Amino acid sequence: MRVAVAGASGFIGQATVHALRQAGHAVVGLSRGRRGRFERPGLEWRPVDVSRGGPELAAALTGCEAVVNLVGIKRAEPGQSFASAHVATVTALATAMQAAGIRRLVHVSVAGPRAEPRSPTPYMATKREAERLVMSSGTDWTILRPGPVAGPGDDFVRNLAATIRHAGVFPAPDGGHAPLQPVLVEDVALAVVAALERPAAIGRCYDVVGPEVLTLREVVTRVADALALPVTLVPCPAPLLAVAVAALERLPEPLLTRAQLGLLSHGLVGDPGPATTELGLVTQPLTAAKIVALSAGVEAWLGLSLRLRRGDEDMFFKTCSKGAIHVAWLVPLAVALIWALGSLTQHVWWRMLAANLVLVPLCLAAVRLPWLELWRPSLRGLVQGALAAVVLIAAGWLGSQVLFALTPEARAEVAAVYSWVHLLPAAAAAVLLPLIAAAEEVVWRGAVAFAVASRAGPWWGAATSAAAFAVAHVSLGVPALVAAAAGAGFFWAWLGLKTRSLFVVMVCHVLWDACVAVLRLY
C-alpha cells in the first residue's frame, strides 16, 4: 500500500514512517519545506502545505491509497493557529482525498481527561472539532487517541528530565494528581499500521495508551528515580503556572506550552482494551531503563542547573572527604580567634588579616581538599564569577531596600561599615581586599563548605558555611553586616559547590566587595 503521511517529519511522524516501511508499505511524506525531512528507502517527499489544501494537495496525493494525518501543534504561532493546524487540515485533506479518489484515512488525535472540562483549551477544543469533521468526512476513517507520547526526541520525558536536572523542585499543576497513561511512540506507530491494515477498524475510535495509569506526580518521581536525582514536588495552581508558561512560549523551544499544561492539569487517559482486542496492540510500560535511554544527552533546562549534586555519577565530593573530621574543631577555633582578636585591636583590617594568617595555613594543612584544582584559574571561571557578582549585587540591593524599610536604623549600621574603607590608604585597601577575600574562601568555603558537603551533602555544606561565616561577623558589632554575611556567605558557598571552584567564588567576592566599597550601592 502507498500511504501519504501528513506530518511525516514530526516526532510521531518519523516513527510512523519507520513502522510503515517495516511493514512493507511505500510512504509519501507531505511537507511544506525541507525542514525536518529525512531520507529513508521507500520514502518519497512531496512539497505541499496541507492546511491550505487545493489542487496542489490533491496532486500530492496522486497514486496513494491511504492517508495518515499526524499534523498537530502545541502552541499557536503567527500564521498558524490551532484551528488552521487541526481543523483546516482535516477539511483540506478530506476534500483532496475525494478529488484524488482515496477513501482510507487514519487520523491521530489525542486522548482526554476522564471528564471533559467545561472550558476546554483551544488545543483540546480544536482537536475534538477535527474529530467531528473526520467522522462526517465521508471517508473510511479510523481515529487514534494517544496519551502522553514518550520516545526519542519527545517533549514529554525529555522535558521532564531537563526540568529535574535544572532544579530539585518541580512545580506540579494543581498538585500533580491528574491521571496520565504514557505510551511509547513506537506503539503509536504500530497502532497506525494496524489500523490501516484492518478493515474492521474503519469507523472506529481507539485509545492508544500505556498499560499503567500514573499521576503526574508518579511520572515525575519515576523520571527522577531513573536519573538518580531527588526531587520535591510543590503544588502550584494551574492558572498561576499558566502565566509563567505563557512567557516560556516565547522561547524558540519552550519547556512547556499552555496547551501541554492544560493536558497535564486535566489528565490524558483512555481504555486500551479495544486497541488490544481489535488491533492486536499491546503497549509497553514506561520503565526506568526506557527513561534513562530517552534522557541520554538531555542537559538541564537552558544549560543551567541549580542543583549542587549532579547525580550518583558525581564522585567529586568523595575526593573532599579526607580530613573533613577536622571541621568539628576548626570552625569553633576560627570563630573564637576572630572574637579574641576583637579585644586586642579594633582595627577591622588588621583583625581580619591576623586571623587569616593563622587560619589559612591551618586549614590547608588539616583539611585535605584538591586545593590546586579548586583554585585553578580560567576564563570560564572569570566570566562565571563576574556574572555571579551581578546577580549577588542585584539581590543585595533588593535585600537592603527591604531591610531599610523594616529596620530604618540599619542605614546607620551600613554607613559605619562604609567608614572602614577609609581606615587604610586606597592602594593598601586594593591589595588587602583580594587577599582577605581569597583567605576567606579557603577557610569558610573550602575548609568548611566543601568538607561538610563531603559528609553531609552540599546543602548542609552551604548552610554550615554561611552560619559559621555569619557568627564570625558578630564580633564586629554590626547586625546588618551579620545578615549580609549570612546571605552572601550562603550564595558564595553555593557558587563554590556548584562550580567546584574557589577561583570563581573569589572573583565574585572581590567584585562584590569592590562595588559595595566604591559605589556604595546599599
Image (spheres, rainbow, N blue to C red):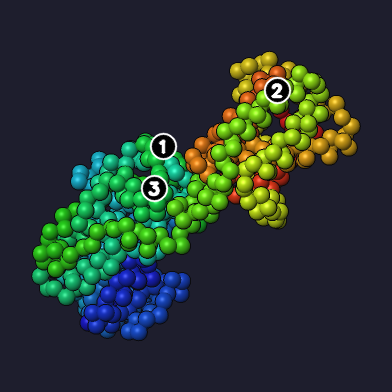
Residue 55 position, x and y percent, is 34, 76
Q: Quadrant of the C terminus?
A: top right
Residue 277 position, x and y percent, is 10, 64
Residue type indicated by callout 1: Leu
In the depicted view, which residue is nearer to us: 207 or 296? 296
Distance, label 1 to label 2, CA atoms, is 48 Å
Residue 350 position, x and y percent, is 81, 29
In the depicted view, which residue is nearer to us: 231 or 86? 231
Residue drawn at (29%, 46%), measured in percent from left and top?
218
Q: Which residue does the numbered mark 3 point to in the structure image?
A: 258
Residue drawn at (12%, 73%), measured in percent from left and top?
199
Residue situated furthest top in the rendering? 409
Identify the secondary structure beneath mark 2: helix
Q: Which residue does the numbered mark 2 point to in the structure image?
A: 339
Number of numbered markers? 3
Q: Quadrant of residue 119?
A: top left
| Marked residue nearer the N-terminal end (3 or 1) | 1
Residue type indicated by callout 3: Arg
| Marked residue nearer the N-terminal end (2 or 3) | 3
Residue type indicated by callout 2: Trp
Taking the image as shown, residue 347 lies to the left or right of residue 377, namely right
| Marked residue nearer the N-terminal end (1 or 2) | 1
**Residue 207 shows in the view:** yes
Q: Which residue does the numbered mark 1 point to in the structure image?
A: 240
Crowding at label 1, few (<14), some or many (≥20) Cα neighbours within 10 Å? Answer: few
Identify the secondary structure beneath mark 1: helix
